Image: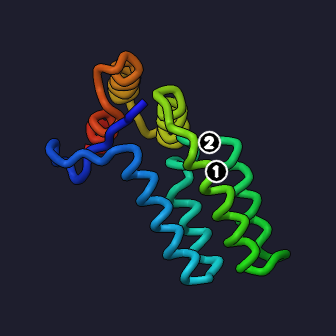
Amino acid sequence: MELNYIRNNNQNEIISEKDAKEYVLQQFKNVKKSNRINNLVKFQANNKYMIMAHNQTELKKLGNIVASYKKIQISSILKEYEEHLKIAMLKDATTKTHTNVIMHIIGFFSKQLNQDEKQRIFSLLEQFRAKNRTIGNMLLEICY
């Protein structure tokens, strides 16, 4: 299934799932070059939900790898992390996994949302599940 994102609120600029995967893997190459645990921790935090949409099992393994930084050399951590990141990104994100990610994110903000805002988000999720809205359109609507 091809799930499209929209870049910079521009309806004419579509980012495919493949583009998003390549972007994540390219960003990891920069982390690897830096050879710094701080950059890996930041990468993990910034890409947690993207990885979750692809493979929740591998996301947990990646989290454990990052958490082991005090016990293992950074070069070994980066090597193992890269192996599991590639495995995670091989699996395609689905409507179901994207919905799960959105629900996780909304959970963090649910206390700050009023009933109308919550209802709007659930309505957008239903449209997404029914394939009447792309993930990109939905995210733009929620974020803006």
Residue positioned 25% across, 51% down in the render? 7
Mark 1 or 2, closer to the camera: 1
Crowd around label 1: few <14 · some 14–19 · many ≥20 (10 Å): few
Marks counted in the figure total 2
Crowd around label 2: few <14 · some 14–19 · many ≥20 (10 Å): many
Residue positioned 41% across, 60% down in the render? 23
Query: Element at badge 2?
Result: loop
- Pick the front one: 144 or 10: 10
Residue positioned 50% across, 48% down in the render? 50
- Pick the front one: 104 or 54: 54
Marks 1 and 2 in Cβ contact (< 8 Å)? yes
For disc 2, the marked residue is 55
Residue 12, percent from left and from top: 14, 44
Q: Quadrant of the C terminus?
A: top left
Which mark is on residue 139? none
Left or right: 102 as drawn, with respect to 41:
left
N-terminal of the pair, mark 1 or mark 2, is 2
For disc 1, the marked residue is 87
What kind of residue is marked 2? Answer: Asn
CA gap between label 1 and label 2 equals 8 Å
Q: Quadrant of the N terminus?
A: top left
- Pick the front one: 1 or 114: 1
What kind of residue is marked 1? Answer: Ile
Up-down relation of residue 92 to residue 44 (above or below)? above
